[in-house]
Structures are given as C-alpha cells and as structure tokens.
Amino acid sequence: MIHKTILSNGIKILTEEIPHVRSVALGIWVDLGSRYEKQNVAGISHFIEHMMFKGTPRRTAQVIAEELDAVGGQLNAFTTKEYTCYYAKTLDEHFPLAADILTDMIFNSRFAQEDIDRERNVILEEIKMYEDTPDELVHDLLARAVWDGHPLGHPVIGNAQVIEDLSRESLLSYYEKFYRRGHMVIAVAGNIRHEQVLEQLAPIFETCITDGTQSRVLVSPPPKLSQTNFQQKDTEQVHLCIGGPGLALSDERIYAMQVLNTVLGGGLSSRLFQKIREQYGLVYNVFSYHSSYHDTGIFGIYAGLSPRNAEEVLNLTLAEVKTICDQGIPEEELSRAKNQIKGNFLLSLEGVNTRMSRLGKSELYLNQVLSPDEIVHRLEQVTSEDIKMLARVLFVKDGLCLASIGPWDDTDSWNHALTAL
C-alpha cells in the first residue's frame, strides 16, 4: 500500500509498507541536477553531494561513515542531470538512526573550508579517472553531440577548471537556494508504517522554507541536426556511440520505447548482440539504451571494437535499425521482449531499494506512482506498429549523432552508413 502526505511547504513524503521484509530503504530526492547549472558552476550539484558526507556539528565524516556500517546498513548518494538522491538501507529497527543521519547531513553539513579543499582534490581525481574510462566517457561525448551548447550535454561530474575555482561561498549559496527551499521528495519502502515515517520526518522537513516559486528554470534543448564528436585517444579499441533525442518519461510512447530498446540491444538475445557479436564476432560488447528526462530523452547504441571493424559495425547497426523502421518486429519477438521487460521489472520489485527509487522518481517526474499492474497493462498494449512508428521518429538520418573515442575518425564511413536510412 502506497501512502502520500504533502507537507504545508509542498514537500512530499511517500511510503510503501512491505510487511514481509525486515528492511527499510529511505531516499531523500532533491529536485536538482547538472542541467540546471550555469557553465560557471558546472559540477556544483555533484560537489555539494560530496560535501554532505564531510561532517556536521554532531558527527564527523568518520562517524557518518561508521554509524550505519555498525548495524549492517548502507548509506550513499548520487547526482544525475535532473536530481540528487541521498539514500540509506537498514533493518527496520534502525530506521530512526538512518533518518537521523540523513537529515543531519542534509540540513547541518558544515562545509568546512579544509573539507572543501580536500574534497575538491577527490573530485578532480574522480574526473581524471572518468576521463581514463573511454567506455563510459563516450556516452558524455554522445550527449554533447546531441545537445551541443545545452546543459544536458554537459557531464554531471563537472569541469575540472570550474571545480578548482568553486569557493565555499558559491557552494553555500547554491545549497541554501535549493536544499532549504523545499524542492524535495522523501520516499520510504519496507517494513514500516506511514505514520512512523511522518512522526520522525515531518517536523524536520516542515522547517524548509518555500515561497511557492520554482527557483530553477527548465529550458528545453532545441532540436539538433546530425553531428559527430570524435576524440582521438591511443587505445586498443574504438568506443562508438550512435544516438539522438529520445522521449520524456511522461511520454505515452515510453512503453514502446522500452520494447524497442529491448529488441534492438537490450540484452544477450537482442538483435545487435546476436548479429554483431554472435554471428559476425566483430565486438565483445554492444548494447542500446534510453534515458528519459522531464522534457526529452536520449537513446544510444554503444559498441567497443577494433578500428578496422568500425565501418562494418556501423553498416550492420544501421541496417538493423532500418529493418525495424520498415517492418516493425514479428509478434513472437514482440511477445518475448514484453515478457523480458515484465520479468525484469517484477523481479526488481523484490528489493526495497528499487521500490523506494520507484516512489521517488515517479513522484518527481509524473506526480503519481503507477501500480505494477498498470505498468504491465500499458506494456502489454504496445503493438508492432507502435514500434515501427516510433523507430521512424527516432532514427532519422538528419538527426542521428555519432561519438567515438579511440584511434578512428572516419567521417566518410559514418556518412556512408547513414545512406542506409
């Protein structure tokens, strides 16, 4: 059973009671991410996330790290393009401790100058590590190609020069503007009653100040024509990404998108994996993906391969895309993909972290939480014609972008492959 309470300042508290488990997951979702940052503070949301773990008047950084560990719990956080989430998972009996730690971090972090300077170096090392991981970095290069000049095209982790220059005053000003202004959703799932959650959390979050206005601005990226983003690097493999604008999470075609992604490159039985890896042996890894935001999304196809195989992989990939655009997918394959998605989704709900995340993200993006039965029902309504029509919208020759990292930048091969569409 899902319960929702809206506090007087607009903050929402959602709970899902699961009596048969012994655990509870708590997530505090801050409606703020890298897409709302101006270029001169790029990476500040991620920096603030780090600072939340560095100590409060009641707890040192070491105590924050140790308290939940001592009872077998987990504590972590992550920043995305549109939100930041702080979460804890623990035994139900230790929920008060987890709630106290998280709220202490979020409302009482010290932002001590020595901690800022130390964590600045940590983040700079994190950026270096990320830049040395081409199979991850290439996805940011694709986003930059798709949304060139828009914050959605910027990496969440930020820019090294900006991170070096961020002052304590800038961090505190940004924190005060967004963390104390009520742009939050609290989500809890596990063996706990809604009343227990409200008793502990409502008095704390009622102190957030909100004037009813939205202090961040959602500027949608303009449509872009096909672009390429090559980064020369001395690597053994070329890391390729093909993609373009996708769907917002609220788009009614999102279920067709899930099926299309599953069929094309969503697993070991997908078309791209079976053809490019299993049939031709040209890659070790190939897959497709789709990420959704408030007003748009991005789809991508990734492959890691030897430079000599790049042209053939591009041709095979776009040929498979064209087949779906022209023919849709057979009913047997459609049914198999639906069952795969349904199975993955329902099995994931056996974990309290997944259920908590579903509450928080659904409320942030949709202002509602659909039941599992409703989601499965909408998935079952997807037809082969839906897939074909969506593919024709997504895979447009003049809108596809290419990103690569490695010893390859063959624009002619890319242009030739595009002629298949």
Image (tube, rainbow, N blue to C red):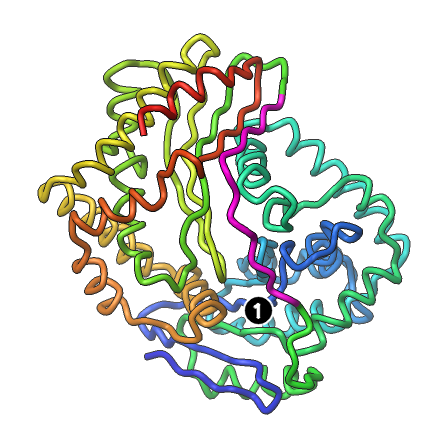
Query: Magenta residues?
Result: 217-231
Residue 220: say if magenta. yes
- Residue 234 pos. (x, y %): 63, 13
Which residue lies at the image location 22% right of the left edge and 32% below the top edge? 323
Q: Is residue 392 left or right of residue 329?
A: right
Q: Is residue 199 left or right of residue 120?
A: left
| Outermost bottom residue | 8
**Residue situated in front as seen by the camera: 32 or 104:** 32
**Residue situated in front as seen by the camera: 355 or 302:** 302
* Magenta stretch, overall SS: loop
- Residue 135 pos. (x, y %): 52, 28
Q: Is residue 45 above or below residue 173?
A: above
**Residue situated in front as seen by the camera: 97 or 376:** 376
Q: Is residue 343 above or below residue 284?
A: below
Q: Quadrant of residue 149?
A: top right
Residue 323: say if magenta. no
- Residue 253 pos. (x, y %): 30, 57
Which residue corresponds to mark 1? Answer: 28
Viewport quadrant of the C terminus: top left
